Image (cartoon, helix red, strand yellow):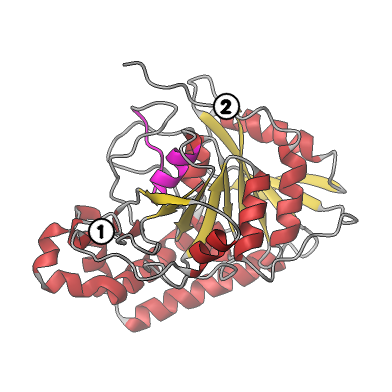
Amino acid sequence: MVGVKDIIDVAGLPTCNGSQACRDAVPAPQDAPVVAALRAAGASIVGKTTTTEFAFTDPTACRNPFDLTRSPGGSSSGSGAAVAAGLVDIALGTQTAGSLCRPAAYCGVVGFKPSYGLLSNIGVTPLAPSFDSVGIIAGSLMLVQQACDAMAHTHAAASAEVKPTLLCGLWDGDVVPYDDTLVALDEAADACKAFATSLRKTTLQANVERIVTAHRIVMTFEAAMAHGSMLSDDRADLLMPKFKAGLQAGAAISAAEAAQATAYLADAMAAFWAGLADVDAILTLPVPDGAPLIDGTTGYQDWLTPWTVFGGPLVCLPWGLDRLGRPRSVMLAGKPGQDALLLSMAAELEAQSPPRAIPQPPRT
């Protein structure tokens, strides 16, 4: 059973983009190619999953199945929660900054954001086409692999002969990870030694603050290009505050400013990967802490934004629970185009991970 984030077309269902501005949307005439591919492979498409408005940052009414006082993350909030709660086996989501990996991490399920462009964005409502990526949330890596194989026809299997070289580290910055998340990273690093040629611990080098700022410029500029017309008609009053403010900010950005930010991000991506020519993948944390309390946000995404900008595949794997009963998660990040290799490494790591925790039904 498959759930589909409500910015992705499913034949016969309206694509409402989590927005009252789309409340009168008519049913989509056909499936998006990613949905059609899953259906052709025998998947049962059971319905839509909740999204933040136009995949931006205004929280939804969705809650985390492990603790209903906590966020499931965003913007693919419903996809992460639906898989964690056992309502679907697989859910499609998208990531433009950290929108798929956070729900996977916070809800204790497997998340896969492929290399940029691997999966089709046709039939997917855009937020920022420079970064938008369809991805997969599932209860196991095997299900992720099956879904990916169905949707990415050029996807090739990794050679079993490959023994990867891994780097383990976190971004340099002021955010201090929760102790339990650091324990999860250390345990995962020890597990990687069973299949990696080498594993070196270090601090990851990138100007995260500047990357996040430049990404925000490009994202809001492109969002305004796609949806800014809503600001000038009666739909403006139906928009949620953060998305409306984002469109307004984007409309004030010049094409030259957006191009300058785009160029900076391209240079940052090239420099980052050039410095890691001898590394196959990076083991890190997707978020510094477990799911936050419901507080008007969808959680911390600044650790994920650079990885989205850098264009490669990401796999989030659940790694038990912290002392507050929140799911912990570790993440493997790979170079663009190395999806098969990263999924192969993730399978090795998943085999040594703690049993996946299952949320208990809330007491009534």
In the image, residue 128 sits, relative to residue 297, either above or below, namely: below
State the separation of the CA atoms marked 2 and 1: 34 Å
Question: Dot 1, crowdedness within 10 Å: few (<14), some or many (≥20)?
Answer: many
Q: Quadrant of residue 26?
A: bottom left
**Residue 313: percent from the left, percent from the top?**
63, 59
In the rendered structure, find residue 357 and report the number of the disc placed on it: 2
Q: Quadrant of residue 333?
A: bottom right
The quadrant in which the C terminus is found is: top left
**Residue 177: percent from the left, percent from the top?**
53, 35
Residue range highlighted in magenta:
69-83
Query: Would residue 25 be counted in the magenta stretch?
Result: no
Task: Out of 267 and 190, give the one closest to the viewer.
Answer: 190
Please give the name of the residue rendered at 46% of the width and 58% of the height, measured from the top-left corner.
94
Question: Dot 2, crowdedness within 10 Å: few (<14), some or many (≥20)?
Answer: some
Q: Nearer the viewer, mark 2 or mark 1?
A: 2
In the rendered structure, find residue 243 and report the number of the disc placed on it: 1
In the rendered structure, find residue 153 and report the number of the disc placed on it: none
